[in-house]
Image: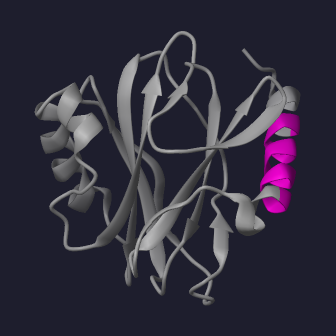
Amino acid sequence: GLRHGEAVAQESSLAAVLLVALPGRAPVLQTKGVGALSVFVLRDDRVFAIEDGARLRPGDRIRFAVQGAGAAFVLVASIDGRRQVSIYQPSTALGPDAGAVTVLPDSIRLDDALGPERIFAVFSDRPVKEAEVSPALASLGAAGPEAVRRERRLPLPFAHASLLIEKTERP
């Protein structure tokens, strides 16, 4: 595991690289007018952007960047092949510039659950409660790993974007 100082140093380097890497170079998953989600990975002192279906390892650190397309708030959550719902970023205010990229605070260390995990960025005009999103995520998880891989949308009254990762021992 990382000692606290190492984790802080890695967080800082990840943030610095993200600020340099984002303008015009990040693969972004977006539906017109919905908002966009980019995911960056820190592995072995390297930071890289990933695309839908990327193979990641347990222990990789991921960080999110979003474009709200006019939304005032974003919540980031996921469902994995074991039916585990995770709220990675509670509903967070976005800046007033609709086209601005917001790098969300903190990174997430991926757990050791192998298989698919679909990450959703949920955009809204007001703070969204975890309870408004978790049942839809749980329902998708209950449909099994193939549904997690296949379904890019949730039955939610909010705009959202998603990205699939596959956690494997070796990417």
83 to 155, vertically: above or below: above
Measured from the top left, where is residue 165 in percent x and y? Answer: 45, 34
Picture quadrant where residue 43 is located: top right
131 to 138, vertically: above or below: below
Measured from the top left, where is residue 144 in percent x and y? Answer: 16, 28
Residue occupying image coordinates x 80% and y 45%: 14
- The secondary structure making up most of the magenta span is helix
Quarter of the figure that contains the C terminus: top right
Picture quadrant where residue 32 is located: bottom left
Q: Is residue 26 left or right of residue 139?
A: right
Which of these two is toward me, 133 or 99?
Answer: 99
Residue 17: say if magenta.
yes
Q: Which residues are magenta?
A: 9-20
Measured from the top left, where is residue 126 in percent x and y? Answer: 37, 81
Which of these two is toward me, 57 or 54?
Answer: 54
Number of labels in the image equals 0
Q: Is residue 18 left or right of residue 68?
A: right
Q: Is residue 70 left or right of residue 80?
A: right
Residue occupying image coordinates x 36% and y 20%: 115
Residue 102: say if magenta.
no
Measured from the top left, where is residue 122 in percent x and y? Answer: 37, 65
Quarter of the figure that contains the N terminus: top right
